[in-house]
């Protein structure tokens, strides 16, 4: 029985589902992101099951990983999409996603992006400021429609996560509850917008459920107050952000998260909008990389911070596993990349079995914010992406070529 992430050692080598990772590396090269379709399908299915018969829309957070093949798979699985840019909307539409299942979030939507989303017919905008709502109203009037929106409120709950991925009080995200009440009332008479929901999201990589319960309770109370005042809201967006296990975190199950969300909402008549991203794709992929050289306690590999920036950006931990472990005593090494920055470290102080140049390593739990945050820093072509399905695989993004690096430059 394979583990939940569908990556396991079989006969001394690491496989994705039933495909040896060494075979993929030999045929596709490295660095390469490898996704396990069985994990993607399972996590989406378990999410649906966890919320039972509740009226809901699971909107996959495209920013976590936006490959077209993955988006197409989620759309066929009944998912909607949480987007934060016009480019992400175009990705969703290109992949066959339904605009009517799209929620547009983010603090800096341009008027052009608003207009494109309205013309596409998205479900709603999650609005983050009074000035943004006024801009949306103006765009709606120009197009002769009323833009459906929810205000993203800040419930002032400590998310207990890394400060760079906390979106609670003091961050650029959300609107104070008192301001939100006044803004809903003011917008009631506007001709270019229509309030249909209420939204909150307190952060990412959440490993504690108490902040979730507190936030849901506060927002549910406001939802009831607004509807008692005649606003007729139909959608309650409870965000996402549930964490995954990178190292030794104690993370809630999807069933536990569902219970924490649903208990404070008992008796509330609303369609729930859920915005998971990391929890669906995070453990569904590894980043394959080959050892180039050894130097003192350093192991230099061909993947760098341009391929996976999370360790440099957040001090994030990703397990690093030899694809074919050698016999011998383990030693503590720093796994570093070729990028010309001291921060280009994929893992410090890792106890690994003996390594030789050419050995293949798998950087685990790399599906979320791996490829989507990659760059061409140091003029490095971005990695290939591969999707494994059972005993076969296919390339779902070709490795960039040198000429791709200057396309569009004059």
Image (cartoon, rainbow, N blue to C red):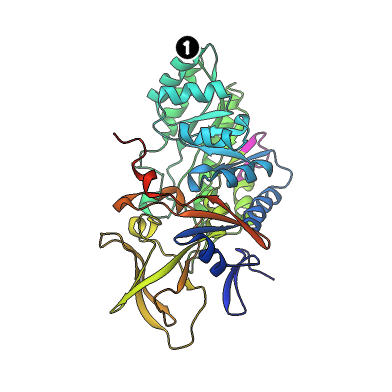
Q: Residues within 10 Å of mark 1 (few under 14, many from 20)?
A: few
Q: Which residues are magenta?
A: 264-272
Q: Is residue 187 magenta?
A: no
- Examine the rendered structure and indicate whether residue 259 appears above or below residue 156: below
Looking at the rendered structure, the number of numbered marks drawn on it comes to 1
Residue 272 picture quarter? top right
Residue 80 picture quarter? top right
Q: Which residue is mark 1?
A: 142
- Examine the rendered structure and indicate whether residue 402 appears above or below residue 183: below
Of all residues, the one furthest to the bottom in this rendering is 328
Residue 46 in view in this figure: yes
Q: x%, y% of residue 215? A: 51, 44
SS category of the residue bearing label 1: helix
Q: Nearer the viewer, residue 399 or 230?
A: 399
- Examine the rendered structure and indicate whether residue 269 appears above or below residue 358: above
Of all residues, the one furthest to the front in this rendering is 403
Q: x%, y% of residue 288? A: 48, 64
Q: Does residue 283 appear to the left or right of 292 in the view shown?
A: right
- Examine the rendered structure and indicate whether residue 243 appears above or below residue 233: below
Q: Is residue 267 magenta?
A: yes
């Amino acid at each position: 029985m394979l583990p939940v992430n569908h990556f396991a050692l079989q006969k001394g080598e690491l496989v994705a589902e039933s495909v040896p990772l060494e075979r993929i590396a030999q045929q596709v090269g490295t660095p390469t992101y490898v996704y396990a379709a069985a994990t993607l399908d399972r996590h989406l299915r378990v999410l649906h099951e966890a919320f039972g018969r509740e009226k809901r829309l699971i909107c996959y957070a495209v920013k976590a990983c936006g490959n077209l093949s993955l988006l197409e798979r989620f759309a066929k699985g009944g998912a909607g999409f949480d987007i934060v840019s016009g480019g992400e909307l175009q990705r969703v539409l290109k992949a066959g996603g339904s605009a009517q299942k799209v929620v547009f979030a983010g603090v800096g939507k341009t008027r052009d992006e608003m207009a494109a989303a309205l013309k596409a017919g998205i479900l709603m905008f999650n609005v983050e400021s009074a000035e943004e709502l006024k801009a949306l109203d103006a765009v709606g009037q120009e197009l002769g429609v009323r833009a459906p929106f929810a205000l993203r409120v800040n419930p002032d709950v400590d998310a207990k996560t890394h400060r760079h991925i906390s979106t609670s009080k003091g961050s650029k995200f959300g609107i104070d509850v008192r301001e939100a009440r006044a803004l809903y009332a003011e917008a009631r008479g506007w001709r270019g917008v229509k309030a249909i929901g209420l939204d909150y999201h307190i952060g990412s990589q959440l490993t504690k459920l108490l902040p979730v319960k507190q936030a849901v309770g506060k927002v549910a109370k406001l939802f009831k107050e607004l509807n008692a005042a005649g606003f007729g809201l139909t959608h309650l967006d409870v965000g996402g952000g549930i964490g995954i296990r990178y190292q030794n975190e104690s993370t809630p199950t999807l069933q536990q998260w569902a219970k924490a969300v649903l208990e404070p909402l008992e008796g509330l008549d609303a369609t729930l909008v859920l915005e998971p991203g990391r929890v669906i794709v995070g453990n569904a992929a590894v980043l394959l990389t080959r050892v180039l050289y050894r130097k003192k306690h350093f192991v230099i590999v061909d993947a760098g911070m341009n391929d996976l920036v999370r360790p440099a950006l957040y001090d994030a931990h990703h397990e690093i596993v030899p694809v074919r472990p050698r016999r011998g005593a383990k030693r503590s090494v720093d796994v570093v990349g070729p990028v010309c920055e001291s921060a280009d470290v994929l893992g410090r102080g890792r106890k690994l079995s003996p390594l030789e140049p050419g050995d293949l390593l798998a950087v685990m739990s790399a599906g979320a914010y791996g490829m989507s945050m990659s760059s061409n820093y140091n003029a490095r072509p971005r990695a290939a992406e591969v999707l494994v399905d059972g005993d076969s695989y296919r390339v779902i993004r070709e490795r960039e070529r040198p000429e791709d690096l200057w396309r569009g430059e004059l």
